Amino acid sequence: MSERLCDRDDLAPLAARIRRVPLAHVPERGREACERLGLAAGPAADLVTGAAGSSPFLADLVRREAEWLADALERPPETVFAELWEGLPEEGGVTAVLSALRRAKGRVALLTALADLGGVWSLEEVTRALTEFADAAVWRLADALTSAEAARRHLPGLEAGARAADAGLVVFAMGKMGAHELNYSSDIDLIALFDESRYAPSDWAEARSALVRVVRRLARMLAERSAEGYVFRTDLRLRPDPASTPVCMSMEAAERYYEALGRTWERAAWIKGRPAAGDLEAGARFLERLTPFVWRRYLDFAAIEEAHAMRLRIRAHRGIGGPLRLDGHDLKLGLGGIREIEFFAQTHQLIFGGREPLLRRRATVEALAALAEAGHVGREDAAWLAEAYRAHRGIEHRLQMVADAQTHRLPRDEEGWRRLACLCGEGDPLRLRRALAERLEAVHARIEGFFARSEADGTDLPPPHEIEARFGPGAPETVERWARYAVMRSERARRSFRRIGRRLLERLAEAANPPGALAAFDAFLGGLPAGAQLFALFEA
C-alpha cells in the first residue's frame, strides 16, 4: 500500500461498508452502548452491540466518545482518521501536545477496532492506520520536546521553535511499527540517533545531552497514563548495547558498533527499521550506510543457525516449548505462532537479500510474496503462510481489544473462549478452538522442516531440555547467557564456538560434578575479553 490511509477520501461511510459483525458476550452492555449513540436496528447497531458487549475497553470508549462516534459512523473511516491525524497540533507546549495525543489515541483505538471487527478494513489497513498514528504521535511530541530544549539554549545553534529535524534527531521505528504492522495494543520499539555532522565537534557533548533528555522524556510521556489515557508503551532497548549506551547516540557511534559488534538478530531487526520522525533524510542516509551490515553479499547460511537458536531460546525462556496446549497458548511466540512465520520470512531474507534487493521488504506478507516471486519459497506455501499470518494477527487483535492489554495468550477458561469467539463473530467456541489448533499445528509443520538440522552434525548446542537434564535447573539460561559475553563479540569467535559447543558441553557433563563444572566454565568464559584463538585451540 503506497499511499497513506489518511489520503484516501473517495469511499463510502463506515456504516455502509460493514461486512461482518461480532456477537455480544454481554448483550446488555452492547445495547446500552447503542442507546448512547441513538442507533436503531441495522448493521451499525449490530457492530456496536457486539463490540461493546464483548470488550469492556471498547464499551468504555463508546461511553466517553459517544457524540464523536455517532458522527464518525456516518462518514468514511479514512476521512475520520485523516482528521484525527491532521488535527494533531504541530506547535504549542509539550503539555498541550501530549493531551491532544492521548485524546486522539482513544479515538484511533475505537475507530480501528470497529473497522476491523466490521470487516471494513483489511488487516493491512488496520495495522497501517495504527502505525501512521504512532508515527505522527512520536513526531509531534519529539518536535515539542526539542523546541523546549532549544528554548532553554541547550541545543547549540538552535533557537525556540526548532524541531527534531533541525536538531538532527532521527527516531527510527523498529519491529512491527517499522513494517507498518503495529498491532492493536502494541508497544512501539524505537531507536533514536542524531546526526553529529550538524554540530561542531566541540558541541557534540552538549547536543547529545539535550537530545538524550528529549528521547528519555519522549518515551516516558508516551507511556504515562492519565485520566485521558496514554499514547504508546515505548521500548528503547533495541539500540546498540542498551545496558551501557545513552538512549540517543550519534550515528557515527552506532555505525562503529554495528561494523564491529553487530549480531545476526540486530541485522534481522534492521530489516524492518525505517526513519519515522525527525530528520528523515539523515535517517535514509544512515540506512544506506548500514546496508552492508544488514544485507550481506554472500549467502549467509550462518543466519539460519542463529535464527534457529534464537527461536529455541525464546521457547526455553518463556516455557512454551513442547506439544500444543491451546489454553493459555502464546499466539505470538508459541508453537505455530506469529513469530514462527516472521522468522521464516526474515531468515530467507537474510540469506538471499544481500544479492537480491527485491527481497528487502519490511512487511511479513510482502516479504513472503517477494520470496515466492524469486523462487525461494513455493507460491502455495507463501500464500498459505500469508493467510495464516493474517488470521493469527486478527485473533491477536481481538485478544488485545478486550482490555487494551498487550497480550498474546489465548484464553485459559470457558468464559474467555466464549468472549473471544464472540469478537470473532463465532457462536461456537469449540469450532474456533478446533480451527485455531489446526492452523497452529499446520504452520509449525510447514516451517519446522526449514529449521530442522542433524543432531549429529556437531555445529549446534543441545536443546534446552537436554542441557537441563545434564546440568540441572537454570543451566539452559546459563548457556544462553554466553552469547552476550564479550568473548563472543566477534563473528569469528561465534563461528568457532558453534563448531565446538556441543562437544564442550558433553565434556563438562562427564565431570564428577557437572553443575559445578558448568558454573566454573561460565565464570571463566565471562571473564575473557576475546575468544576466537581460545576456541581455535579447543578445536585443535
Image (spheres, rainbow, N blue to C red):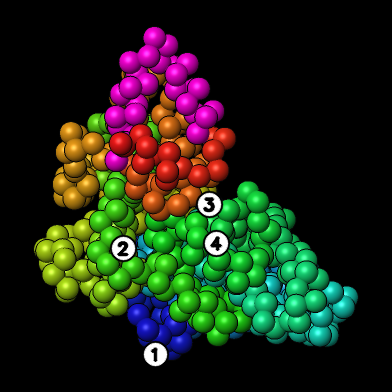
Q: Amino acid at mark 3?
A: Asp
**Neighbour tally class for label 3: few under 14, some 14-19, many 20 plus, Cα within 10 Å:** some
Give me the disc on residue 404.
3
The magenta stretch spans which residues? 499-525
Residue at the image point whose x is 35% and y is 44% from the top:
496
Q: Nearer the viewer, mark 3 or mark 4?
A: 4
**Element under label 1?**
loop
Residue highlighted by disc 4 = 257
Question: Which residue is the extreme one toward the top?
Answer: 512
Residue at the image point whose x is 17% and y is 69% from the top:
372
Question: Which residue is the extreme one toward the right?
Answer: 152
Q: Amino acid at mark 4?
A: Tyr
Q: Are marks 4 and 1 in contact (CB under 8 Å)?
A: no
Q: Earlier in the sequence, mark 3 or mark 2?
A: 2
Label 3 to label 1: alpha-carbon separation = 31 Å
**Element under label 2?**
helix
